[in-house]
Image (cartoon, grey):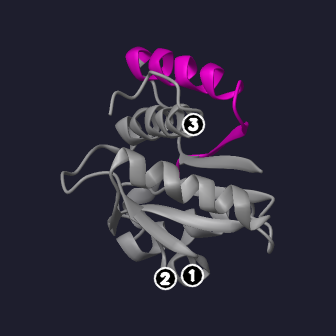
Amino acid sequence: MKITLILNGKTEDDYIIKGFLVYEQRLKHYISFETIVISALKNTKALSIDQQKQKEGELILKNIQSSDKLILLDENGKEYTSVGFSELIQKEMNSGIKNVVFVVGGPYGFSEEIYKRANGKISLSKMTFSHQMVRLFFAEQLYRAMTILKNEPYHHL
């Protein structure tokens, strides 16, 4: 199974880039992991929030295959413990799905088309994080999930 993380726009924050790269490298030991960065929208002042979400949604959909399982990282999604998230990953690995795509939305969330296409939503916390920070948190939690599944000591139960 492959896991793809779709991100909205690049980050300029050096500490996020460095932290994300650490976990991206660690993940390669466990699973096929790919990151796709869609371009941040330009000249958005003339666009409504719904128009921005629509355009971001179109960019996201261009990177998703019909056979992919799509899971949104969304504030209204289901919350998991780290162990529960590892069980979700194990379930997906056992299901025979070839690619699970997680998506970090833009600053206003997702378009209706993306919500309709999604197979699920998860929330990393009841707190709100910048979509830049979410990429780092998700990579760390995915790495943690893989170490839990391998009974490695990174996650202390």
Give the left or right position of residue 137, taking residue 2 as reference: left
Residue in the image at 58% along x and 76% along y: 119
Give, as a single range, the part of the protein colored magenta.
14-42
Q: Can residue 42 be spotted in the picture?
A: no
Q: Earlier in the sequence, mark 1 or mark 3?
A: 1
Q: Give x and y (percent) for residue 133.
A: 36, 36
Tell me, yes or no, whether the highlighted magenta stretch contains residue 79: no
Residue at horizontal 49 percent and vertical 21 percent from the top: 17
Residue sitting nearer the eye, 43 or 153: 153
Kind of residue at badge 1: Glu
- How far apart are the two marked residues, 2 and 3, measured between alpha carbons? 32 Å
Residue receiving disc 2: 112
**Mark 1 — residue?**
113
Pointer 1 with pointer 3, Cβ within 8 A: no
- The residue that mark 3 highlights is 146
Residue 15 sits inside the magenta stretch = yes
x%, y% of residue 49? 36, 70
Residue 32 spot, x, y in % from top left: 76, 38
Q: Amino acid at mark 3?
A: Met
18 over 116 or under it: above or below: above
CA gap, disc 2 and disc 1: 4 Å
**Residue 35 against residue 56 in the figure, above or below:** above
Quick one: label 3, few (<14), some, or many (20+) residues within 10 Å? many
Comparing 61 with 82, the one in front is: 82
Q: Quadrant of the C terminus?
A: top left
The three-letter code of the residue at mark 2 reads Glu
Q: Label 1 near label 2: C-beta < 8 Å? A: yes
**Gap in Å between the C-alphas at discs 1 and 3?**
31 Å
